[in-house]
Amino acid sequence: MNMRLAGFRDSLPPRALVIGAATAVVVAALTALSAPAPADDDEALKAGEVSHSKNVNRVGHVPKRSPLSDFNSDIAFHGDYAYGGNYSGFTIFDIAKPRKPQIVSQVLCPGGQGDVSVSPDGNLLFLSVDYERTNNTCNSESASPTDERVWEGMRIFDISDPSAPEYVGAVRTSCGSHTHTMIPDDAGESIYLYVSSYGPSKGFTNCKPPHDSISVIDVPLDDPGSASVVSTPRLFPGGGGPGTSGCHDITAYPDRNIAAGACMGDGILMNIADPVHPKVIDRIQDENFAFYHSATFSNHATKVVFTDELGGGGAPVCNEETGPKHGADAIYDVTGAGKKRELAFRSYFKIPRYQQDTENCVAHNGALIPVKGRDVMVQSWYQGGVSIWDFTDSSKPREIGYWERGPISDDTLEVGGSWSAYYYNGYVYSSDITEGLDVLNVRGLRSAKRVEWDVFNGQTQYQYPE
């Protein structure tokens, strides 16, 4: 969610933390003793609380629980575990039985956004901090952006024991970390994190203009506590598009040495053969886009889907007045080869159902479903729910399934809905901002069921077999 742009950043109440991360884990783990709420789409459907296509239904649910009462955000996966980000920390879920997910532990560590990723071996979790804090620990407090002691950036946790995560280090980055992208090095000795952030101001201590770069963090796997920034590549040395002052998110495809950046007023294609020094090879701007938010490659990296987070995630733009080309996805073919690759626009996609004006709804986080011979994606649309859509023909995308709750309120606009939706080993997992974790079953995509991942981070793509 685009907190800086939407103006939520200063309106949210300050967060005070009085217990450390280790204590929070012990306290929160006790909640796992209670059973998850039942997932009964049929009853919810009768009550008018849920609508869905015939091929999609909810089969599991875990409601959000104290002490993580803030917004839920992104999700990552490793083995039988899902890791749910929250503006105040993260939750680890046991999903060995996807229809009966259970909370294993929770870490209370406030910092805003809470974008998460997990290392390929499942031992490390990375957590983005986008709000100014008094220091880098979980015991920090909110700070003014003009305070000299202000800290924001990346926190690193050891999650080798999912029931007792341990804080192992942190790295300060310019303008903090709104999101980040994990890229393993070829030697298996380090992990690189591409840190995206934006929103500079001359008066800010840690976020001054011009902010035309990302931060690249090197995390040595044998000593993650010594992680540090090793480069700050400038992506827009001549200035970006209107309003561009950093990137919101980057999706990397390491096997293809390519990445796509969603950078406010610009969409970019990068060569990441040298991951410490990525190079921009093409840049696009779309007059119908308000804010380049995220990107997804097709399996063979011949296409890129960019999302437009019109209204910063807090506005109702899935309506007739806004239309089909704003707050939507834009599909591009990748033409050419090597350093001569370019992005060629083909079409827009937006969910084909109008939402109420009390529902924040816009294109948000999603990723591919590994369907043989087709390009199929699952995607969150906040209160527009979860959409499954096919862009095999990049000029004629079409929705093939969906699941959504009704509005939080029929009278007032309240921010909520699905933040991230990803397919992982047979099921779609959706992180709902206010409601918790939903598990969805999608029928009719049999080939996807045969693809098993050991690890899944939405912004780090790997080619699946076809």
Image: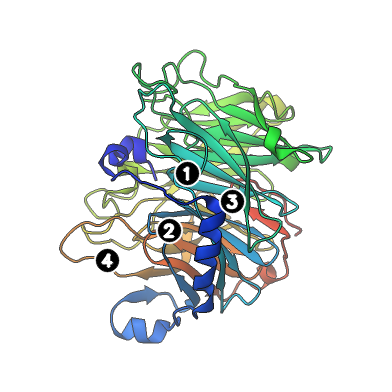
The residue that disc 4 covers is 407
Mark 2 vs mark 4, foreground winner is: 2
Residue 239 numbered tag: none
Q: Residues within 10 Å of mark 4 (few under 14, many from 20)?
A: many
Farthest right residue in view: 187
Residue occupying image coordinates x 47% and y 74%: 61
> Between disc 4 and disc 1, whose residue precedes?
1
In the drawing, what numbered circle is on residue 68? 2
Q: In which quadrant of the rendered view does residue 406 lie?
A: bottom left
- Do labels 2 and 3 touch, CB within 8 Å? no
In this rendering, the answer to whether 196 lies above or below 93 is above
Q: CA distance from mark 1 to mark 2?
A: 15 Å
Where is residue 364? Give x, y as percent: 43, 50
- Residue 264 placement: quadrant: top left
Badge 3 element: loop
Q: CA distance from mark 2 to mark 3?
A: 22 Å
Q: What residue is disc 1 on?
A: 139
- Mark 2 or mark 4: whose residue is earlier in sequence: 2
* Three-letter code for the amino acid on which mark 4 is drawn: Pro
Q: Residue at x 43, y 75 (%)?
A: 53
Neighbourhood count class around disc 1 (C-alpha, 10 Å): few under 14, some 14–19, many 20 upward: some
Rendered position, 366 above or below 178: below
Q: CA distance from mark 4 to mark 3?
A: 26 Å
Q: Dot 1: what SS?
A: loop
From the viewer's side, name the closer residue of 39 and 151: 151
Left or right: residue 29 versus residue 266 is: right
How dense is the environment of label 2, judged by Cα within 10 Å: few (below 14), some, or many (20 and up)?
many
